[in-house]
Amino acid sequence: MDTRQLPLGPMPSLETGEIHVWFARPADLALPALVTGSDRNGRLRHARMQQHFLLRLLLGRYLGCAGRDLRLVRNAAGKPMLDGLTGNSGEKLAFSLSHAGGWLAIAFGLGLEPGIDIEPSGRSVRWRELAQRWFPAGEARAIEAADSPAREFLRRWTAREAMVKSMGATIAASLSALQLDPLDPDRPTQVPGHWPEPLQWSLRRPEAPGGVVVCLACTGRLRRLRSLHLQTPAISPPAASEG
């Protein structure tokens, strides 16, 4: 995985048909104190503003403008998107973000509509109850038979979430119509009627930091998928003075 540090140097080129997925732990980055308050609500506001700061920073670098000048809007399902801006090629620059377990993942696509979802791999999850309630019987049996049922459940859940995010839909309205191959959680077999056909989907597992389960979804021809890790440079301790 490609590692980049703050402050950002030259950005990697994002070409048509490519998706870049950036991973960061906002709490570990030397970001400004955007809000104050030590209560839970204050910490949540601070985390959200850190996420938006990083999103605007990266969007601005891809588009060659100041991130603060970008106008973000939301669709009816609440998905954030750029208001009419495109990359240098004239193709639409789209993005998707997900945060869990202290990690933030942001996927950027040019000419593609990415959907990204991450979950902590060690998350305690009622996998049997949820699989039996929401997944078809074949998938529920595949989860039950897996070496790590909880992780297999998360692989199938992140695939669904990523597809929903790519479509700009909601999980509540889409979950009952989504099915995956019991033998392959990255192969859709059924989707809502107004979505692109199952064979038009690409579901990938980008290289990611340890401790997370991640899925990237899009329709169309995905030419290249690239993972990047955004870090703050390590600060060396001051040298001991002589004397």
Image (spheres, rainbow, N blue to C red):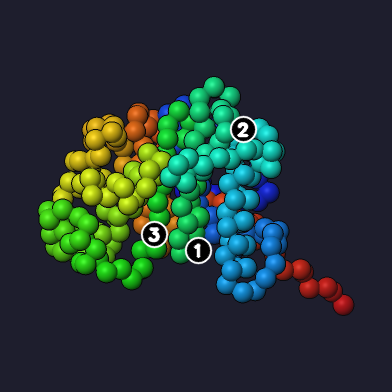
Q: Crowdedness of circle 3 by 10 Å Cα count: few (<14), some, many (20+)?
A: many
Could you say where residue 76 lies in the image, as x and y percent from the top left? 45, 42
> Looking at the rendering, in which quadrant would you find the C terminus?
bottom right
Residue pushed farthest front? 76
Q: Nearer the viewer, residue 221 or 237?
A: 221
Residue denoted by label 1: 102
Residue at coordinates 61% horizontally, 32% vertically from top-left? 63
The residue furthest right is 243
**Real-space Cα separation, disc 1 to disc 2, in angstroms:** 27 Å
Q: Position of residue 27 (x, y in %)?
A: 59, 63
Mark 2 crowd level (few <14, some 14–19, many ≥20, 10 Å Cα):
some
From the image, tell me which residue sits under label 2. Answer: 63
Task: Look at 47% across and 44% down and name the residue there.
Answer: 79
In the drawing, does residue 12 fall left or right of residue 220? Answer: right
Q: Tell me if residue 190 comes above or below residue 154 in the rendering.
A: above
Helix, strand or loop under label 3: strand
- Considering every residue shown, the one lying at the far top of the view is 90
| Residue name at image x 62 percent, y 38 percent | 71
SS label for mark 1: loop
Q: Earlier in the sequence, mark 1 or mark 3?
A: 1
Tag shown at residue 119: 3
Residue at point 69%, 42% (across, down): 68
Note whether 142 is above or below 83 in the view shown.
below
With 98 as the anchor, is 136 left or right in this view? left
Instruction: Measuring from the top left, give residue 30's x and y in whole percent.
Output: 67, 59
Tell me how far mark 1 sits from mark 3, CA to CA. Answer: 10 Å
160 up-or-down from 197: above or below = below
Q: Give the quarter of the image for residue 142.
A: bottom left
Mark 1 closeness class: few <14, some 14–19, many ≥20 residues within 10 Å: few
- 179 or 2, which is in the foreground? 179
Q: Cα distance, mark 2 to mark 3?
A: 29 Å
Amino acid on which the number 2 mark rests in the picture: Leu
